[in-house]
Amino acid sequence: MEKARRPTLREKTARLLDLPAETAGGPPALVLTGDRDLYLERYKGILAYGKEEIHVDGGKWVLRVKGRDLEITALRPGQLRVAGRIDGLELV
Amino acid sequence: MRVRLGWLLGEISATIQGAGAEEFLNRCAALGADLWAMERTEADGLRIRAAAGTWPRLRQAAEESGCALDQVRRQGLPVFLGGFRRRYALLAGLVLCLGVLGVGSRVVLDLEVTGNETLSDREILSQLRLCGVGVGTYSPSVSVRTVENRMLLTMDRLSFCSLTFHGTRAVVSVREADPAPELEESTWPADVIADADGILLHVEPWAGDARFSQGDAVLKGEVLISGTMTLDPPPLIEGDLGTMTVRAEGRVLARTWRTLTARMGLTAAGKAYTGAEHTRYSLDLLGRRVNFYQNSGIPYAKYDTITQYKTWSPWGSRGLPVVWCRETFREYRTAALTLEPARAEALLRDRLMETLLARLDQGKVLRQDVQAVRERDTLTVTLLAQCTEQIGRTREWGRPGDAAGPILSDTKEQSEAGDANDRTDSKH
């Protein structure tokens, strides 16, 4: 049985003050627009980059982006944009 | 949009080879190097685009991740402009153009005058040039307030003057002063005398005693309305109350007869062109004249000068201060010319009629007759006209410089001019 993740201090504070989780600057945020564009914030790093699969380190988990003709169209510190045909997202 | 921004900022294309391509990307993000359009080329290959200024950070990231970094292409506006770094003449020309543009946009090329009614544009612009403002003046060097004050001081007919610069155009807004009214001395004693011989048609004394009535014949110089008024005693009282001195005023209409004569020689010296011409050119640039004839003189003793100006007006503009001037000198000799008598008579008749109308005060011509007599080479034209006009003229008493002096009321005014006719001679 997988051990449940303990919330961080930032997450506890945000929950206590009834603030949105992204304002606490904690976990990564994902915005998926249709199946063609994926935007990530506060990611930790890129673990694997291929045309059919991209693995992104989110800290507590790894995001697997599966699809076809995937391409990282923009890369900035803490921000990432992926374009292509996105077939699935998986948190590992 | 990213492509265009990348072109403006300058971008590089590079390829990454090695097993740690993902590590390279993470290190680039950590170093703050923005990347875009990352494309997998093969198993271990990656093609990226980045801002041109991030090349040192990309190399650092490649070294730390153990990848091979190759630059494929540099492009964009900074790269394009960088190609001109060693073209010094081009850079100098660019700086010169910018300088000329910056200075030239403040040089006065066009002058506009508004608000003038009786004063001509030429008069105002001429005075403005004397104050230091004209075509070619650098407007920031002009003290506008000083120029405005000098314009007002030197041109009495101006009551307001404003000078405004709009780039290369200078606008002069003026307001003309109302002419000072003529102050009439209303208390100095005076008579109204006849200005011409005639038969009175209407006598209207406003002040003073009328000496004549309607239908009387008067001579030039006679007192029509006297400034010495006899005071009448009240009813039932006898006695002499004496006289009172006033300034006589009134309106006296009379029928007059005018005779005007003019003479003209039928033979006159005229110009006979020899056909020889000499032309020279010059260029007026920003008010400065550039001669293309150097010191060459005019080879004729007698000549007419015909000057033609052509202003350069490109693109429908009002005209730039670049004027091409062409002067043509046409030689002539003096020769005796004979005028046609009929033409000379018509000319003299028109002149006499103009003179007569100018002399009539509130009058009109009732009848006219013209006589022309030719004696040898001289034509004499006489205009006989019957008119109605206002013949009363105020003559003050004893003014300094007035030969008449005080006039007693019982003294008969004599005609100043024995000759009843006017005479006008003109020779052409």
Image (cartoon, rainbow, N blue to C red):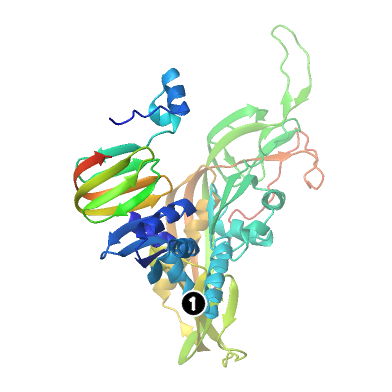
Of all chains, the one bearing label 1 is: B
Q: Would residue B341 be found to the left or right of residue B294 on screen?
A: left
**Residue type, mark 1 in image:** Trp
Residue B396, by quadrant, is top right
Quarter of the image containing the C terminus of chain B? Answer: bottom right
Whether residue B211 is visible, yes or no, is no
- Along the line of sight, the residue nearer the viewer: B220 or B321: B321
Q: Position of residue B227 (x, y in %)?
A: 72, 31
Name the residue at 41% across, 53% down.
B26
Name the residue at 69% across, 53% down.
B143
- Along the line of sight, the residue nearer the viewer: A6 or B54: A6
What residue is shown with label 1?
A: B324
Q: Give the answer, above or below, for where B129 lies relative to B233.
A: below
- Along the line of sight, the residue nearer the viewer: A31 or B173: A31
Q: Position of residue B259 (x, y in %)?
A: 53, 57
Task: Return the residue found at the far top.
Answer: B236
Task: Return the residue found at the far front.
Answer: A1
Q: Position of residue B184 (x, y in %)?
A: 70, 36
Q: Secondary structure at mark 1?
A: strand
Q: Give the answer, above or below, for where B284 lies relative to B182.
A: below
- Along the line of sight, the residue nearer the viewer: B383 or B137: B137
Name the residue at 41% across, 77% down.
B340
Numbered disc total: 1
